[in-house]
Image: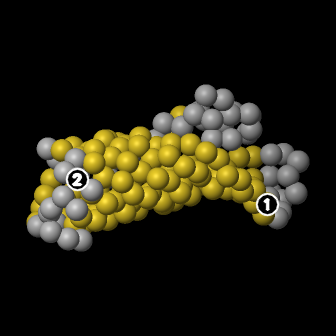
Amino acid sequence: MLSVLFLWHDALAQSLDLTAPEPYRIEAHIEAGPMISEFRKRGLPQDAALTTVGYNGFVRLMWHPDYMVAVGVLSGYELIVADRYYVPDSLTDGWIHSSLTAIPMMFDVSIQQFGFEFGLGLGGYFATSTIQDLTIAHGTRLEFGGIAHLWYRWEISKGLTVGPDLF
């Protein structure tokens, strides 16, 4: 269902240090922005685009046991694709709405140095597909996967940084 996704994420990301900038600290990261998904093959609808645009938002809680390495959890929301297409034998006016969303629940490890951060989240996605014609049908399943992220950040005040993010 989630075959191959290339998630592009260029947004303002915020990092809030909850303690002094010392080796043992906790950080909260809030990230949101547009997302482009690339599919190798889409069976339905027949002429569906292989590239779709959506949006996402993530929250990461990270603990720094030393200067470079951080470990924590990642969760959020992703609208991967939302389509509207015409089906002549539909029970309504012929237009059907469909969407695919995901909620990741992952363990995240990252390395941070010189304003750069590279990390990897591993875990599961709760993927939900929705089709709306005369009625609404939902399907949810657990998919396993990962997210790699690269980010550069600038400190705008003590404990608050912003920067672009590539997921």
Q: Position of residue 15 (x, y in %)?
A: 25, 61
Q: Mark 1 or mark 2: name the one nearer the start of the chain.
A: 2
Q: Quadrant of residue 130?
A: bottom right
Q: Position of residue 55 (x, y in %)?
A: 47, 53
Residue at label 2?
Answer: 66
Mark in the foreground, 1 or 2: 2
Q: Is residue 113 left or right of residue 35?
A: left
Query: Could you say whether the residue bearing mark 2 is in a helix, strand or loop?
Result: loop
Q: Quadrant of the N terminus?
A: top right
Q: Which mark is residue 137?
A: 1
Residue 125 visible in the current orientation:
yes
- Which colour style is shown? secondary structure
Residue 30 visible in the current orientation:
no
Q: Position of residue 64 (x, y in %)?
A: 27, 57
Q: Which mark is residue 45?
A: none
Q: Quadrant of residue 57?
A: bottom left
Q: Quadrant of the C terminus?
A: top left
- Residue 3 vs 19, above or below: the answer is above
Q: Nearer the viewer, residue 145 or 45?
A: 145
Query: Could you say whether the residue bearing mark 1 is in a helix, strand or loop?
Result: strand
Badge 1 amino acid: Ala
Badge 2 amino acid: Asp
Q: Nearer the viewer, residue 98 or 17?
A: 17
Q: Is residue 163 left or right of residue 44?
A: left
